[in-house]
Image (cartoon, rainbow, N blue to C red):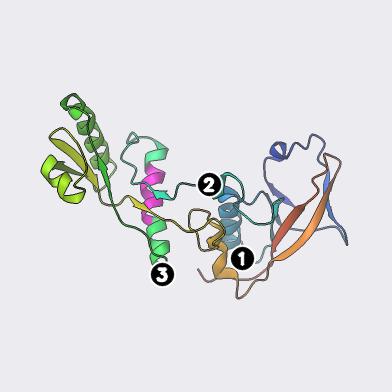
Amino acid sequence: MLHWVNFVRVLGLNNFSRICCREKMAISDFLVIGGGIIAINIARQLKRQFSDATVTVIEKENHCGAQASGRNSGVLHAGFYYSPESLTGKFTRLGNKRLMEYCESKQMPMNKCGKLVLTKDCKEHTALDELLRRGKVNDINLQAITEEEAKAIEPRVKTCQQALFSPTTSTNNYPVQDLRNPFLEVQSLAPWSEKLKSDERPFQLFGGNHVPDLRTLVFKSVSISH
């Protein structure tokens, strides 16, 4: 049975019926439309959970992450801006920890520069207090520091008496095409490369609008160790 993990409408296919390759009908256990951050992670997780299944990723560009995913700012946020009860806060905190662990396990350098939160005037101290509260509730390492301590970190900063310092905020500056780039998440497929060959074949869509240069990355039935 073919499992669909997609939003067909984003491709403008109002009458999507089948996917054919030039040589033969493509058969896959899971089909993921698009090669951006979310799609690649879905494909990766499917392969990890169902190691014997075939996972097919369809991407119309020449490489994954060519659209919005490849324009990511490269900032690994800590998560203290979000309300404690929100899923955004929870996922940001967990994502910070897991992505840092992933980069360290793959020996991918991260710029652990930290982040300073400043105030334009003393009226904004209440806002700092709220961010500090959210950070504590979310179990995030967030420190209240003085103006002098902030200047010791970055001499050019201007703040009114107080500031916050987030030591777990980091940055990454890999090129968009670098397959190790964690913010593209394409590197998530790298551990498969020795056991798995990517099969790129031009596909045509029938029963809907024609997409001329559609390509697929077929992840075959192999076991993965990571």
101 sits to left or right of 59: left
Q: Residue at x 40, y 57 (%)?
A: 98
Residue 83 spot, x, y in % from top left: 33, 33
From the viewer's side, name the closer residue of 50 and 173: 173
Whether residue 102 is in magenta: the answer is no
Determine the CA span between mark 2 and mark 1. Answer: 31 Å
Q: Residue at x 34, y 53 (%)?
A: 170
Mark 3: secondary structure:
loop
Q: Which residues are magenta?
A: 90-97
Determine the CA span between mark 3 and mark 1. Answer: 25 Å
Give, as a three-letter code, the residue at label 1. Answer: Ser
Number of residues whose C-alpha sits closer than 10 Å to that of mark 3, classed few (under 14), some (14–19) or many (20 or more): few
Give, as a three-letter code, the residue at label 2. Answer: Arg
Q: Can residue 1 be seen here?
A: no
Give, as a three-letter code, the residue at label 3. Answer: Gln
From the viewer's side, name the closer residue of 59 and 31: 59
> Residue 15 lies in what quarter of the image?
top right
Residue 41 spot, x, y in % from top left: 56, 54
Residue 119 spot, x, y in % from top left: 22, 32
The numbered mark, 2 or 1, whose residue comes first in the sequence reads 1
In the image, residue 140 above or below residue 220? above
Circle 2 residue: 71
Main secondary structure found in the magenta portion: helix
> Residue 110 lies in what quarter of the image?
bottom left
Number of residues whose C-alpha sits closer than 10 Å to that of mark 1, classed few (under 14), some (14–19) or many (20 or more): some
Circle 3 residue: 107
Mark 1: secondary structure:
loop
In the image, residue 146 above or below residue 169? above
Between circles 2 and 1, the one closer to the viewer is 2
Circle 1 residue: 51
Residue sitting at the far front? 156
Residue 125 spot, x, y in % from top left: 18, 29
